Image: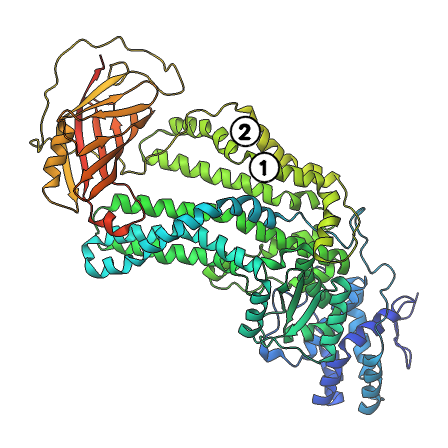
Amino acid sequence: MRSTTPEPGGFGGAGPGELPIILDGLRAVAGDLLGLLASHPLANLLVLVAMRGAGRPARDPSQAAPHGYGAPPSPAEAVPSLGQTIDALRNRLTAQGIPADRADELTYDTLKLIFQQDRGPAEIEAFLRALAGSPPSGPAAGSTPPSAPGETSGWMLPPWLWLYFLGVLAPSVPSAVEGFQDDVAGMATLVGYLAANVQRAGTAILTAAGVLEFLPALLLLTGILGVLLPGTRGRWAERRHRLQPSDDPVIGEMTAYVRRQAPAAGLRLGERDDRLARVYPVGWREARVAVYPPLLRLWSRDRDAAQAVLLHEVAHLRQGDHLIVGLASPFAWFVRSWGVALTALALVPAAVYLAVGGTGTSPVLNSVLYVAVAVPISLILPVAGLWVAELSADRYAMSVAGPAALARALGPARPAGPVIGRLLGLLSHPPLRLRLWAARSWPRGTAALAALWPLAFVVRLIAITVYELFARMLNGSSFTEAVQVVAGGLPEELSSVRTLLAEMAALLLNWPLIAPLWLRIWAPLRASRHRFAPYLLSALVPGLLVAGGFAAGPAGEVSVASSGPSPSAASPAQPATGPVTEPAAGPAAEPATERTGLVDDRPWTGHSLPADLRITTFVRLDQQGGDPGWKARAAGRLGAGVWRADEDGRLTFSDLAGGSDLRPGEGGWLRIGDEVTFWLPIEQVTESGSVATEINGTIDLGGGPAVMNALWARKPDGSAADLLASPALDFTARLDVRTAP
């Protein structure tokens, strides 16, 4: 049995392969030991080491360093303590493959040997300075984790963030630019209407919620500017964050290391103590890494972890996403700001409005509900793209420095901060648990990570489906009816993204061949091809979605949910405020028992389609805004007209009054159970020109006479002033339904 008693002048108990590792660990913490020696008496250091060694707690072998990528040291810890130095030496030994218990034992035995009282401070200082100036030893045998078959230092995931830009955002450039001016004009009038007329607060809330509609355009435009003007972004980042060149020897070592991985990369030194490093572009194929004092301290305590940090940042340049992510990225900033804008412009004002008893809550709630759901759904794809970019950079760092070094760089789980801060952080970086899982599972997990962005489409589809189910049940449909309608619309949803899904499958299938070429675009380096098997497996996700879209065959009737007010219970009958047409008796047509086509063409209250509908009584008639006399005129025109519902889903209106100021168009209807959702465009001619209006709402066919709940209002056309000044008629009416001749 080998004795563990220290031998004079040597490192007692060290095995044949452990001495080079111990010397390498001492070299890494030599600067910290010199600082401790200068600030503490030698006898005190030896006593402290002995006390900590006697009372040291058991450590989890997987426990990360206390100062990792996710949790840099605080400013108060600029001068490392004895505990930090002990942890740094222990982690250095563990990183070289020594078991945790053995590394713990060697750490304390080595420090006791260094601070022996029979050696004077001058002798210890000379030894540490000589060790600090020596070149680092090569990696010990078995200390570098084996690479996965076919995985080389050029490993990366497919560039999903670029596909999002080119395949999703780029095609929407014309419509985004066209609608941007209207959105800005609507926002410009918002403050004026809030100040001028407090009674229109509900309309103002709707306008504020509508402001969020142009955030996708801002996201697209700022992202394009960041890609097209990398030099401008780089200069602004250096000026904004006070990044400067440095002649510090540690910066020189870091720069040399970084340029071995990416020759076009450089370093700049920042002042902040709450971060380690961030990449930013200075050209299309050039980037710099902003490094901060905590990383310099980590470089001396745990060089492998510090190198993993630099490798992660350099990987963004090798992947080409340094133009989109990183320091001073406008794209990432707008993604994180979206949630704040949603809260500030929609949720908080609506909650205050409802709390003080605001009227007209139905349109307010409908608008806020739509925006509250539409914004997160719109964020799924860009957030997934940002996550994949970060995980891909982690994988490259693991392929060079090893998963243990990256796990220490990521750091232990941080103390829980504000909920809002943590949620906003998840919009640009994946959860720490997911990144640590990827580090533990390396080199496995390639197929899962490669399929992450395609899976985001599945999540997006599920979110849309859940929202549609919820919205239809709010409008009175049963769960079974809502499921049938939403399930029938899934093929249409898949068909709308069929081309993009096919592009995703093709990229995955060919990525092992494309990856070396993609790397050469951004860095003059060579890389081996990847294995095909993981990407073939991940290609099943978009492949199955594409097959689902094709299996549906020709697209059927498009289901469009009404955005009008939900039906309300009819109040007791009141005297008619408009013309009343008494129902005429007549024989009912033979009803059909089943629907015969894509449209639910069953009889309406026992009368086969096509059917004529006439208003018999107005139960409720409310006007919002505009000329007070318009309500009576509008009710008279509606009461004197005839609606016609055809079997194919078309809806028309005949104005029997014969006036030329109303020009009804062709609308449509959709039946779900005993509820019919309808919409009808009407061009209203005035002295100053024509105005596009629309009547939309629902018709209840169950429980007696048919009842119509509808809203007749001006269609939104980008002019907030005209929209607020135009009248709107909200009404409930009983109908006479007859089979059309």
Residue 568 figure quarter = top left
For the image, the number of numbered tags is 2
Relative depth, front residue between 710 and 674: 710
Distance from Cα at disc 2 to Cα at disc 1: 10 Å
Tell me the SS state at disc 1. Answer: helix
Q: Does 576 sit above or below residue 301?
A: above
Q: Does 63 sit above or below residue 618?
A: below
Tell me the SS state at disc 2. Answer: helix
Mark 2 and mark 1 in contact? Answer it, CB < 8 Å. yes
Please rate how many residues cluster around mark 1, counting C-alpha atoms within 10 Å: few if below 14, some from 14 to 19, many from 20: many
Rendered location of residue 216, percent (x, y)? 45, 51
Residue behind mark 2: 549
Residue found at x 73% / y 71%: 255
- Horizontal side of 507 relative to 500 (left or right) equals right
Rendered location of residue 405, percent (x, y)? 73, 62
Residue found at x 59% / y 75%: 273
Q: Is residue 426 visible?
A: no
Rendered location of residue 530, percent (x, y)? 76, 45
- What's under tag 1, amino acid-wise? Leu
Residue behind mark 1: 501
- Horizontal side of 118 relative to 456 (left or right) equals right
Residue 18 figure quarter = bottom right
- What's under tag 2, amino acid-wise? Gly
Quarter of the figure with the C terminus: top left
Please rate how many residues cluster around mark 2, counting C-alpha atoms within 10 Å: few if below 14, some from 14 to 19, many from 20: many
Residue furthest front as drawn: 688
Rendered location of residue 727, percent (x, y)? 18, 44
Quarter of the figure with the N terminus: bottom right
Relative depth, front residue between 20 and 15: 20
- Horizontal side of 616 relative to 424 (left or right) equals left
Q: Earlier in the sequence, mark 2 or mark 1?
A: 1
